[in-house]
Image: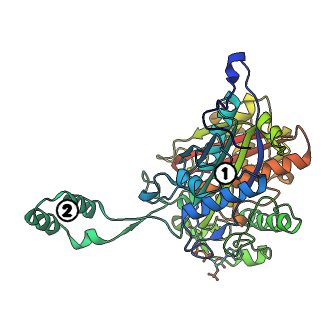
């Protein structure tokens, strides 16, 4: 059912002073692949287009004009300045579907979906697709500042003399390429090194981290085996499951691994390749809609995208851990809805590192953190571990930065739908730059 381009598609919801629900119709992603494996030669655009086309096929959206598609990549080549729009043009969606590139580091997909849900609630659009993509295998490589200045001068040079003058300024050390890094610009430390300090500060043991990692692999393997992932993942380039998934992960095997981060901690370093997310390639996309739009097309309404909250912390001087923003944003979000952790049926905390999840939960259980950092009367609360990441999370699936939000929203919406109307689910995603985005979904 294609909407003619100039037909008004929105209802001004605010005119009557009420917002209408934004519902999650469903999601689709390609299996995630460890960097430099199955998708070593796939571009961001190819992967995002595949995620969109999977969604098109699943929900019969061929030739459909969507209100807006928002997605993005954390690592993007300059030529991909319009990555999302180009992916839409390459997909089976109508070519007059508007698109926007979004980037909030690892929370990119969450930002895309949160803002799109708001547009639907406001009545600005009837349908939307949000998601993200990232390729470590095909990440951009830059030249040095010095070499770039010479190249720009060379480009502007009008005479042979000018060109020779520009080239004569080039120094051999300026020719060394600069691959995209995962270091925080203000500290020069990687996210893993930052998290190693937070993990240590909160006294999170190696055993607790390895247990979380083993559970992630076990839960994701069970989700695939039970068929839960069948309408969430579309095969791509020969992969049918995330190739980081190791159903045979065990405490004994993980105990043998050497620390990967926390060199300055010496013998007390606890973060390994197994309790840290692997570097990953992949893409995801989620279809949101107004109830009317979904009902007119006979599409499912798995859950309502109720609300989202952005957070940021001051990590530069070590006052707070780099990945701790959700520890503050979740209490604000739940307070807005008069909810506590106990009211939730599912809790999805992105496993950037096992230490991130465990430090966040320990902060919520701390009387001191609750009083001094959150301004509460005491501890914020305890996460019931039987509700945590029950279908596996990023330690097992992998974490293609911008694609993780879409993976979680699609999975949680399905879980809530199965649980039943009114069930509640929380999503918490930390991000570089001391940021994070959290969201609340309600089952339909
Ligand atoms: C906001 C956020 O999300 S922040 C997070 C952003 N993400 C990141 O920063 C990525 C962090 N991860 C990394 O940088 C890398 O994956 C690292 C440094 C942790 C590990 O890199 P590598 O050493 O290349 O990992 P590799 O895949 O080779 O694994 C190392 C070893 O652990 C083993 N291993 C990894 N996982 C498991 C497991 N679950 N069970 C058993 N063994 C495992 C591997 O088999 C390998 O063993 P081998 O050396 O005998 O072959």
Residue located 70% across and 43% down the image: 2
Report which residue position mark 2 lands on. 154
Looking at the picture, tell me which residue is in the foreground, 277 or 228: 228
Against 181, is 379 above or below? above
Q: Residue at x 72, y 16 (%)?
A: 16
Q: Quadrant of the N terminus?
A: top right
Task: Give residue 8's mark.
Answer: none
Which mark is in front, 2 or 1? Answer: 2
- Distance from label 2 to label 1 (Cα)? 42 Å
CB under 8 Å between discs 2 and 1: no
x and y percentages locating residue 41 in the rendered image: 55, 74
Cβ of mark 2 under 8 A from ligand 1: no
Q: Residues within 10 Å of mark 1 (few under 14, many from 20)?
A: many
The location of residue 257, given as percent across then percent down, is: 66, 76
Quadrant for ligand 1? bottom right
**147 sits to left or right of 101:** left
Q: Position of residue 91 (x, y in %)?
A: 62, 57
Q: Residue placed at 83% from the left, 56% from the top? A: 390
The quadrant in which the C terminus is found is top right
The residue singled out by tag 1 in the image is 405
Answer few, some or many: residues within 10 Å of disc 2's Cα (few below 14, many 20 plus, some between 14 and 19): some
Residue 3 drawn at (x, y percent): 68, 39
Viewer-side residue, 438 vs 265: 438
Q: Would residue 325 be seen by someone viewing this image from the given angle?
A: no
- Residue at 62% over, 68% down: 278
Q: Quadrant of residue 230?
A: bottom right
């Amino acid at each position: 059912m294609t909407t003619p381009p100039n037909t008004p598609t929105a209802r001004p919801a605010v005119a009557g002073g009420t917002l209408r629900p934004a519902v999650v119709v469903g999601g689709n992603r390609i299996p995630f692949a460890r960097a430099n494996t199955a998708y070593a030669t796939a571009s961001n655009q190819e992967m995002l287009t595949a995620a969109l086309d999977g969604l098109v096929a699943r929900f019969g959206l061929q030739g459909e004009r969507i209100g807006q598609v928002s997605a993005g990549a954390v690592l993007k080549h300059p030529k991909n300045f319009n990555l999302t729009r180009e992916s839409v043009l390459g997909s089976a969606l109508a070519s007059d579907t508007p698109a926007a590139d979004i980037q909030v580091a690892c929370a990119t997909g969450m930002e895309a979906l949160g803002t799109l849900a708001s547009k639907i609630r406001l009545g600005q659009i009837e349908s939307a697709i949000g998601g993200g993509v990232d390729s470590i295998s095909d990440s951009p490589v830059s030249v040095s500042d010095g070499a770039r200045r010479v190249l720009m001068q060379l480009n502007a040079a009008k005479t042979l003399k000018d060109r020779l003058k520009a080239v004569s300024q080039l120094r051999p050390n300026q020719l060394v390429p600069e691959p995209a890094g995962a270091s925080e610009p203000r500290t020069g430390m990687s996210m893993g090194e930052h998290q190693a300090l937070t993990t240590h500060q909160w006294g999170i043991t190696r055993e607790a981290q390895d247990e979380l990692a083993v559970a992630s692999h076990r839960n994701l393997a069970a989700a695939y085996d039970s068929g839960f992932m069948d309408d969430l993942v579309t095969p791509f380039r020969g992969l049918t499951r995330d190739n980081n998934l190791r159903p045979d992960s065990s405490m004994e095997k993980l105990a043998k691994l050497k620390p990967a981060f926390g060199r300055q901690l010496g013998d007390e370093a606890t973060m390994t390749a197994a309790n840290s997310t692997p570097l990953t390639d992949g893409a995801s996309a989620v279809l949101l809609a107004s109830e009317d739009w979904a009902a007119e097309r006979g599409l499912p309404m798995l859950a309502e995208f109720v609300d989202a909250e952005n957070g940021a912390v001051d990590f530069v001087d070590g006052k707070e851990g780099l990945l701790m923003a959700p520890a503050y944003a979740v209490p604000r979000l739940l307070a807005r809805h008069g909810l506590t952790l106990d009211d939730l049926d599912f809790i999805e905390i992105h496993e950037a590192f096992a230490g991130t999840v465990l430090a966040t939960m320990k902060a919520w259980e701390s009387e001191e953190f609750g009083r001094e950092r959150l301004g509460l009367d005491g501890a914020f609360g305890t996460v019931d571990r039987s509700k945590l990441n029950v279908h596996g999370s990023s330690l097992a699936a992998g974490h293609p930065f911008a694609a993780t939000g879409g993976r979680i929203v699609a999975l949680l919406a399905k879980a809530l739908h199965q649980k039943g109307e009114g069930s509640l689910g929380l999503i918490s995603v930390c991000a570089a730059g001391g940021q994070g985005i959290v969201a609340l979904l309600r089952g339909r």
